[in-house]
Image: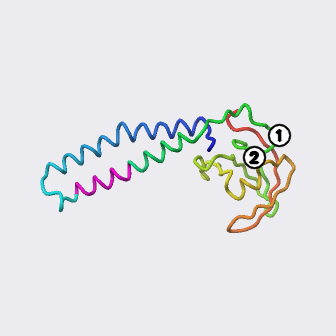
């Protein structure tokens, strides 16, 4: 089971709704039009539409499973004194003295550009359960580095 923020759950539900009610009917229409052109064995448009249909069915099934096996987590019940899912963590890299802020999220919400890191990433795993003032060593594929947790708050609370 995965836990999602309400925001991400709503985004996935909206994408799924769009795929089922808008995009999929367009592909069905494209297949019908291509079929009407006659010989299907050498009909590029037909084969392209069928490939698009297959890809879309896969995406729809994936999103349905994400929603089926996910639960929305209430940020109000999360502890604010240690790093958990949806914690917004202000850190200092002890090797470079650089300050950074990340929010710990589920793998389905990860977005480095927005400062969201997966709880299953090396950094996320190293930070989970730690408190302000704690120092952690992160063993990432590219390097090993040390971080100090300066403060923690709950995102969306």
On screen, residue 3 versus residue 82, left or right, reads left
Q: Which SS class for mark 1?
A: loop
The quarter of the rendered structure image containing the C terminus is top right
Q: With respect to residue 92, does 7 lie above or below?
A: above
In this view, which residue lies farthest toward the bottom? Answer: 142
Q: Which residue is mark 2?
A: 89
Q: Position of residue 41 (x, y in %)?
A: 18, 61
Mark closer to the chain start, 1 or 2: 1
Residue at screen point 35% across, 38% down: 22
Query: Seen from this angle, which residue lies furthest right?
Result: 133
Residue under label 1: 81
* Residue situated in front as seen by the camera: 120 or 93: 120
Please name the residue shown 45% across and 40% down the image.
15
Color scheme of the displayed model:
rainbow
Q: CB of mark 1 within 8 Å of CB of mark 2?
A: no
**Residue count near mark 1 (Cα–Cα under 10 Å), binned few <14, some 14–19, many ≥20:** some
For this rendering, which residue is in front, 133 or 48?
Answer: 48
Left or right: 71 as drawn, with respect to 13: right
The percent coordinates of residue 33 (x first, y second) are 19, 47
Q: Position of residue 95 (x, y in %)?
A: 80, 64
Does the segment drawn in magenta span residue 85? no
Magenta segment = 45-56
Spatial distance from mark 1 to mark 2, Cα to Cα? Answer: 11 Å
Element type at mark 2 = strand
Residue that appears at 62% across and 44% down: 1
Q: Position of residue 117 (x, y in %)?
A: 66, 51
Q: Is residue 64 depicted above or below 41 in this figure?
A: above
Looking at the image, residue 154 lies above or below residue 141: above
The label nearer to you, 1 versus 2, is 1
């Amino acid at each position: 089971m995965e836990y999602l923020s309400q925001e991400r759950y709503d985004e996935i539900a909206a994408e799924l709704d769009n795929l089922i009610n808008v995009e999929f009917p367009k592909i069905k229409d494209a297949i019908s039009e291509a079929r009407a052109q006659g010989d299907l064995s050498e009909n590029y448009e037909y084969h392209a539409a069928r490939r698009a249909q297959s890809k879309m069915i896969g995406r729809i099934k994936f999103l349905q499973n994400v929603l089926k096996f996910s639960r929305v987590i209430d940020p109000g019940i999360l502890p604010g004194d240690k790093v958990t899912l949806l914690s917004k963590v202000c850190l200092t890299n002890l090797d470079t003295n650089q300050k950074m802020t990340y929010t710990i999220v589920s793998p389905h919400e990860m977005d480095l550009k927005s400062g969201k890191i997966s709880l299953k990433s090396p950094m996320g795993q190293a930070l989970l359960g730690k408190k302000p003032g704690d120092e952690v060593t992160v063993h990432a594929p590219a390097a090993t580095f040390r971080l100090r947790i300066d403060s923690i708050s709950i995102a969306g609370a």
